[in-house]
Amino acid sequence: MSFIKIRKKLLNVENIYHEGGPVRHEPIKQGSISVIIENPYAGRYVEDLSQLVNEGKSLSEVLVQELIEALGGIEKIQGYGKGAIVGLNGELEHGATWHEAGGWPMRAALPKAKSIVPSAKIVAAAGTRLYIPVHHIEAAYVRSHFSTVEVGTVDGPRPDELLFALVMSTGSRVHERLGGLRPEQISVGDGQR
């Protein structure tokens, strides 16, 4: 991964017991893993971005395993998402390299994953927080699992850097109660229903 130069890695796990309602015996866990890397394309237009996509996949494979372990194992993961913050000397397309690089390794590591991996990306200054959407891993229409996970760090990304992030959850919103398709009702197997 000589093309990818990591300055910083961040791992965060939240244990959510309640939001004012009944207290859960076992919390919902939401986790994120992010890296701040040098943006090899900062300050210039490059037509072919495939090297960052290809080497980003190898990076993502490592990050996925670390995040799964932090959340208690493959069998616990019910939701996921991905995102990127591009430093100000980059362009949005540099963050878009994470769609394939971050998404495919996450789906490959989770045997039940069929749903699209939702995504968010922005060009922004250091310290910006990004809210990454979360969907159920088997069916995007399971609305109990619609949520967001916040990522960011005060000192990044610097203008010539990128922040790439993966997020996962072990369950729905802690007090979800608005109906819709339930995980046990997933039947079509198309990643949507």
Image (spheres, rainbow, N blue to C red):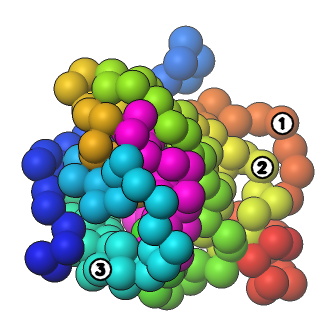
Q: What span is colored magenta in the figure?
A: 72-101
Secondary element under disc 2, as helix, strand or loop, is: helix
Closest to the observer: 46 or 112?
Answer: 46
In the picture of the structure, the residue carrying the numbered disc 1 is 178
Tell me if I can see residue 83 in this picture: no
Secondary element under disc 1, as helix, strand or loop, is: loop
Closest to the observer: 133 or 181?
Answer: 133
Query: Magenta stretch: residue 79 in it?
Result: yes
The x and y percentages for residue 108 are: 46, 86
- Rendered image quadrant of residue 161: top left
Q: Nearer the viewer, mark 2 or mark 3?
A: 3
- Rendered image quadrant of residue 106: bottom left
Q: Is 90 positioned to the left or the right of 162 in the image?
A: right
Q: Residues within 10 Å of mark 1 (few under 14, many from 20)?
A: few
- Rendered image quadrant of residue 155: top left
Placement of 177 over or under 100, stated as above or below: above
In the picture of the structure, the residue carrying the numbered disc 3 is 55
Q: Tell me which amino acid carries mark 3.
A: Glu
Q: Tell me which amino acid carries mark 1.
A: Leu
Quarter of the picture containing the C terminus is bottom right
The x and y percentages for residue 183 are: 71, 64
In the picture of the structure, the residue carrying the numbered disc 2 is 143
Secondary element under disc 3, as helix, strand or loop, is: helix
